[in-house]
Image (cartoon, coloured by chain):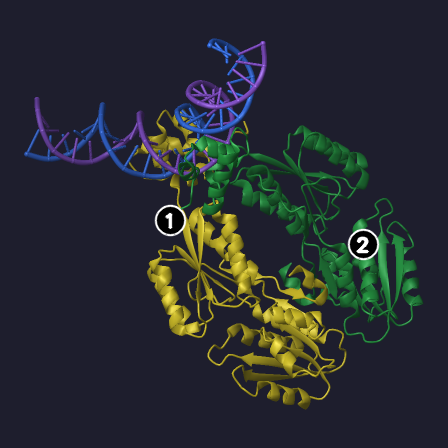
Chain colours: A yellow, B green, C blue, D purple
Amino acid sequence: MGEKPTIKEIAKLANVSIGTVDRVLHNRGDVSKKTTQLIKEIMENLDYVPNTFARNLALNKSFKIAILLPKHQKGEYWSDPIRGAKKAMKDFKALGVIVKIYLYDQNKKESFSKVGEQIIKDKNEAVLLAQVLFDETNAFIRKCKANKIPFVLIGSSHSDSGAISYIGQNSHQGGRLAGELLSFGHKVASNYLVFNVTKAENPNFNVKERIEGFQEYFENNGIKKASIEIFSIPQEDYKLVEKAKAKLNSIPDLKGIFVPNSKSYILSKALSKDSNIRIVGYDLLEKNKSLLQDGTVHFLINQKPYEQAYHGIEYLYKYLGMNQQPPEIVSLPLDIVTREKLMYY
Amino acid sequence: MGEKPTIKEIAKLANVSIGTVDRVLHNRGDVSKKTTQLIKEIMENLDYVPNTFARNLALNKSFKIAILLPKHQKGEYWSDPIRGAKKAMKDFKALGVIVKIYLYDQNKKESFSKVGEQIIKDKNEAVLLAQVLFDETNAFIRKCKANKIPFVLIGSSHSDSGAISYIGQNSHQGGRLAGELLSFGHKVASNYLVFNVTKAENPNFNVKERIEGFQEYFENNGIKKASIEIFSIPQEDYKLVEKAKAKLNSIPDLKGIFVPNSKSYILSKALSKDSNIRIVGYDLLEKNKSLLQDGTVHFLINQKPYEQAYHGIEYLYKYLGMNQQPPEIVSLPLDIVTREKLMYY
DNA sequence: TCCAATACCGTTAACGCACACGGAAATTCA
DNA sequence: TGAATTTCCGTGTGCGTTAACGGTATTGGA
């Protein structure tokens, strides 16, 4: 009894051939109303579900998925999502998923466009990408939509551009968490600094939201007397370290610093050796991990780029191959990394 | 070219029939060393992966997997792995996986044996379980081995009983992490307490290791002057709260408490209202989450029981259905939960 | 030398479904 | 009434893999 009903059995019960059953199954017409009705009833009664294996084998499709990310060095941020994508590649290969990785030069916008073109040309059926170059990405997204190519955005949570899914972290909540960690155990009013190294050309929405969340945390928790200063400086500033040092020295009794992006390693250059300032940063770059290890930085918030890419591909496959609509916004949990947790990464 | 290689193509390249390729694929013998070698090389080069759909269709099997856990109330620890198992059930149903959940009464050892018998009787082909009742579990495991039923152990990392995989957390490292979190920002020598509510009948190895890791952390980090007291008391002690209160009062300037299991909510009963003691506990029970929320407890280490069960079933399926050997020991990352992270759970 | 055992290998029928093709019956039109 | 449609349905092939079955050399023993 536990056996699963097949098309053949249904055909027998309805006194028709499997072809007819197949036709009503996909309402492909050419079946009289009476038999359609009969077959549908039988399927209902037997609780028929098509065998996924047979179905996919017969369809014998393969899905070309592109992943579009910036070129990078080993140990940099983008190597993690690449790892995740490769793992997904391996895991889903047997299911007919073909993942191809396209890299562009972050500093050459025309490089992005060129690679984007290539993705369309190569007849990829879906794309996973991160919105690093804002305008260029939007242009590319428009092309995807025109070609009916579904895409997933990782690292952001703005649900406006028509992606089938946005996979990222709640930046606002990340800022709040940073506030909690920075102020943990501090009973009295203290001075905190947000150290924000910006990229002149690419304003980052996530960073903005993290800072807002950070501020909100202190407001909501009655630590109003805490003073929070925000220090923003473009990464290109050739006097960056110098200016940063000056800033640090200008704040009396500085208790903690929040680095709302991956630039903790830049801040560290401006830090005095024996500084006793508590630091919360973002992203597990190799350089940042070293800082955790030697105690300069105390907490890093991990965006889980590996998981972002992995799940992104998983969702795209399920969308293409199994007609499954993924959640529109996927908020990965904030992952707090300390020195003692470092061994896992 | 981007197309996936099939057995047929490999056969053609090796100048043999698909039967031969299949034989080396499943090392079923009856193939000369030379051709075996050749075929393996070709498969390697083409990066061949058997088509899951075709494979499962041909095998036309379904896999009955049992999951054996203690009975529990909503909000208790064991409801999480059950959730994970149910998710896996849903995800893998289309692949022919049938998961059945068996619950036993933790306090009646004969209940465990009875349910265990049932699992064997029901012809389950694999089992996922946690070693809660030590001896009884060992007995059951012996039966599994006798019946050649593969099993996965969750929540422990002792690789001795022949499970195909142990999925859990590194308890030692968890203790170290607790030490790091408890002492974070404390520059001077302080007094700490380990609050260990035990279950008389079931000594827990994980707890033991956590405490060892906790102590080690302080030793390794030159915080030797820190005094660490370990207070163990059976949960059944009817004067528990009273005794705990006395203990807390007996320690001058107590800075932090480590609860190496899920019993933070018991400790909280012995705490004075306005206590200013830092607390690190384990496990996201509803009661413990409340304590995080109201600021009584500051960090909870999450064992990820949901993920443990989910991956356990995933591994069992891959083992049964795809001949994939899972890692013998899977150490899930330690997950630090704070109030600001609570919204994710 | 002949036969049997062995080592290797090819062929083939499933598995359940999708879909193209063609064919018979019923209907319409001239 | 005969031909042309239209409606409805059955047959057959293929998807990639599994595994049983059988076949041909090759080797060894008497």
Q: Is residue B11 above or below residue A71?
A: above
Tag 1 and tag 2, C-beta contact below 8 Å: no
Estimate the spatial distance between the alpha carbons at disc 1 and disc 2, rounded to whole Å. 53 Å
Q: Pointer 2: what residue?
A: B209
Q: Is residue A314 above or below residue D27?
A: below
Q: Is residue A47 left or right of residue B334?
A: left
* Residue A74 drawn at (x, y percent): 55, 66
- Dot 1 amino acid type: Met
* Residue B313 drawn at (x, y percent): 62, 43
Residue at 37% x, 49% y is B1
* Quadrant, the C terminus of chain B: bottom right
Q: Is residue A323 visible?
A: no
Q: Is residue A63 visible?
A: yes
Q: Residue B27, labelled with which disc?
A: none
Q: Residues within 10 Å of mark 2 (few under 14, many from 20)?
A: some
* Residue A85 drawn at (x, y percent): 51, 57
Q: Pointer 1: what residue?
A: B1
Nearest-to-viewer mark from 1 and 2? 1
Residue B182 in which image quadrant: bottom right
Please tell me if label 1 and label 2 are on a single chain: yes
Question: Which numbered disc, 1 or 2, marks the residue that appears first in the sequence?
Answer: 1
Residue at 86% x, 73% y is B189
Q: Secondary structure at mark 2?
A: helix
* Residue A275 drawn at (x, y percent): 73, 81
Residue B180 in which image quadrant: bottom right
